[in-house]
C-alpha cells in the first residue's frame, strides 16, 4: 500500500504544471495574512515542518516584502511562545536536559555569558535547530529583552535570505545562474551554521 501511494505521489508530481502551482499560491494568498503568519509560527512549535518551504511559499503567495514580513512575524512569535512556555516549567526541566544532553550545560553557560551574540548568530542560519536553541535559551538566565532582540534580528536576516533565494520560483528555474547562486548560498549558510553550532556547543 505504501509503495502504491508513493508511486501515485510521484506520478502526480510528474504531471504537475507551473500553472497548478500558481493557482495554489493564488488560493493561499486569498486567505489573507493568517496562513502566512501561522505556518512559520507552527514551525517553531513543530520543528519537523519545513521552514524553508514555508518562507518560499509566503514569498510566492504574498510577494517579496509582504511574504518576508509574515514569515518573520510568525517565526519570531513562535519562538517567543516556546521560550515563555519553557520558562514557566522551571528548573526541573533544566536538570533533566543537562542529564540527558551532556553538552547542554556548557552551551547554557555560554548563552548566559554571551547571550546576544550567540543567539543572534545561530538564529541567522536556517539549518540551526532553533527549537533546541529556544529551549536552552529559556533554561538559561538570559533576559527576555536580550532574547527577543537577538532572535528578532537574527531571524530577520535568516528569513530575508530565504525569501531572496526563493522569490519568484519560475524565474529561478528559467535562470540557471540564479538557481546555481541560490544553491551555493544555501550551501554556504549550511556549512557556516554547522561550524558555528559546533563551535558554540564545544
Image (cartoon, helix red, strand yellow):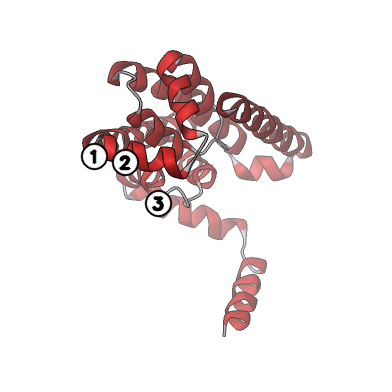
Return the residue nearer the eye: 170 or 43. Answer: 43
Q: Is residue 199 above or below residue 96?
A: above
Which-is-in-front pick, marks 2 and 1?
A: 2
Which-is-in-front pick, marks 2 and 3?
A: 2
Residue 133 lies in quadrant = top left
Residue 8 appears at what percent x and percent y?
A: 61, 78
Which-is-in-front pick, marks 3 and 1?
A: 1
Q: Quadrant of the N terminus?
A: bottom right
Return the residue nearer the eye: 49 or 165. Answer: 49
Seen as rendered, the residue at the extreme bottom is 1
What is the C-alpha distance between the residues marked 3 and 1?
36 Å
The residue carrying mark 1 is 89
Secondary element under disc 3, as helix, strand or loop, is helix
Residue 63 appears at what percent x and percent y?
A: 47, 35
Residue 56 appears at what percent x and percent y?
A: 53, 42
Disc marking residue 93? 2
Picture residue at 57% right of the left edge, 24% below the top: 200
Residue 113 appears at what percent x and percent y?
A: 43, 14
Residues under numbered marks 2 and 1 in contact, where contact means CB atoms less than 8 Å apart: yes
Amino acid at each position: 500500500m505504501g509503495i502504491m501511494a508513493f508511486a501515485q505521489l510521484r506520478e502526480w508530481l510528474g504531471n504537475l504544471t507551473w500553472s497548478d502551482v500558481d493557482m495554489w499560491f493564488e488560493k493561499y494568498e486569498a486567505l489573507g495574512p493568517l496562513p502566512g503568519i501561522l505556518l512559520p509560527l507552527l514551525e517553531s512549535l513543530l520543528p519537523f515542518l519545513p521552514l524553508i518551504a514555508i518562507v518560499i511559499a509566503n514569498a510566492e503567495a504574498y510577494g517579496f516584502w509582504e511574504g518576508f514580513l509574515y514569515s518573520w512575524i510568525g517565526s519570531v512569535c513562535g519562538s517567543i511562545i516556546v521560550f515563555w512556555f519553557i520558562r514557566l516549567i522551571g528548573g526541573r526541566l533544566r536538570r533533566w536536559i543537562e542529564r540527558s544532553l551532556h553538552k547542554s550545560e556548557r552551551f547554557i553557560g555560554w548563552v548566559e555569558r554571551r547571550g546576544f551574540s550567540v543567539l543572534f548568530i545561530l538564529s541567522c542560519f536556517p539549518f540551526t535547530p532553533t527549537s533546541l536553541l529556544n529551549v536552552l535559551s529559556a533554561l538559561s538566565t538570559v533576559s527576555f529583552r536580550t532574547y527577543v532582540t537577538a532572535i528578532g534580528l537574527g531571524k530577520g536576516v535568516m528569513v530575508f535570505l530565504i525569501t531572496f533565494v526563493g522569490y519568484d520560483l519560475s524565474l529561478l528555474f528559467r535562470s540557471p545562474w540564479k538557481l546555481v547562486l541560490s544553491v551555493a548560498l544555501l550551501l554556504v549558510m549550511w556549512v557556516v551554521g554547522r561550524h558555528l553550532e559546533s563551535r558554540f556547543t564545544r
